[in-house]
Amino acid sequence: RFHGEGFQEGLAEGSHAGLAEGRRHGALHGARVGSEIGCYHGFALTWHSLLQKCTDEKNRKKIRALDSLIGLIQKFPYEDPTYDKLQEDLDKIRGKFKQVCSMLNVQSDFRIGAERSSLTF
């Protein structure tokens, strides 16, 4: 009887602790992804705005790549954590960001640290 009661108490306590830990982990991971995508979006919008003044073919290609990146970011399902292709879409955004940085001849380094996230050039 004591074994069964102890098991039930331990199961209830473990379930409660697991839910709290899962929520903390989910909130932290979600904040990191949001911060990363927010930096990419700001980067793309800024460069898009800067390149609008130039009309040569090289810059039009860069603008098309930036438009593609902005489109991927806008389609990203921020509010659906159960979306089955979330990681795949995030990888596409990261790849497009790297491509855009290469086209712009910009060295990028997105880091998430304990104190802040940063995008350096």
Image (spheres, helix red, strand yellow):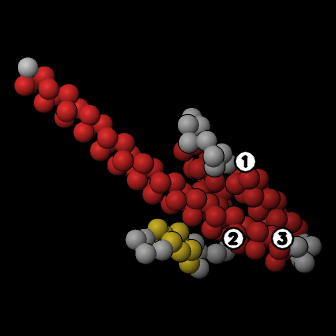
The amino acid on which the numbered mark 1 sits, given as a three-letter code, is: Lys
Q: Amino acid at mark 3?
A: Asn
Are the two marked residues, 1 and 2, in contact with CB atoms closer than 8 angstroms? no
Count numbered badges in the picture: 3
Foreground mark, 3 or 2, reads 2
- Where residue 81 sits, quadrant-wise, is top right
Q: Nearer the viewer, residue 38 or 43?
A: 38
x%, y% of residue 103? 70, 68
First along the sequence among labels 3 and 2? 2
- Within 10 Å of the Cα at label 2, are there few (<14), some (14-19), or many (20+) other Cα atoms? some
Report crowding for label 3: few under 14, some 14 to 19, many 20 or more residues within 10 A (C-alpha).
some
Look at mark 2 in the image and give the residue it sits on.
Answer: 43
Q: Give the number of the disc on residue 75.
A: 1
Q: Looking at the image, which residue is at 53% across and 74% down?
A: 118
Q: Where 93 sits versus 106, above or below?
A: above
| Badge 3 element | helix
Mark 1 or mark 2: which comes first in sequence?
Answer: 2
Q: As rendered, which of 93 and 17 lies closer to the eye?
A: 17
Residue pointed to by mark 3: 59
CA separation in Å, label 1 and label 2: 17 Å
Which quadrant of the rendered structure holds the C terminus? bottom right
Residue 20 x/y as whole percent: 36, 47
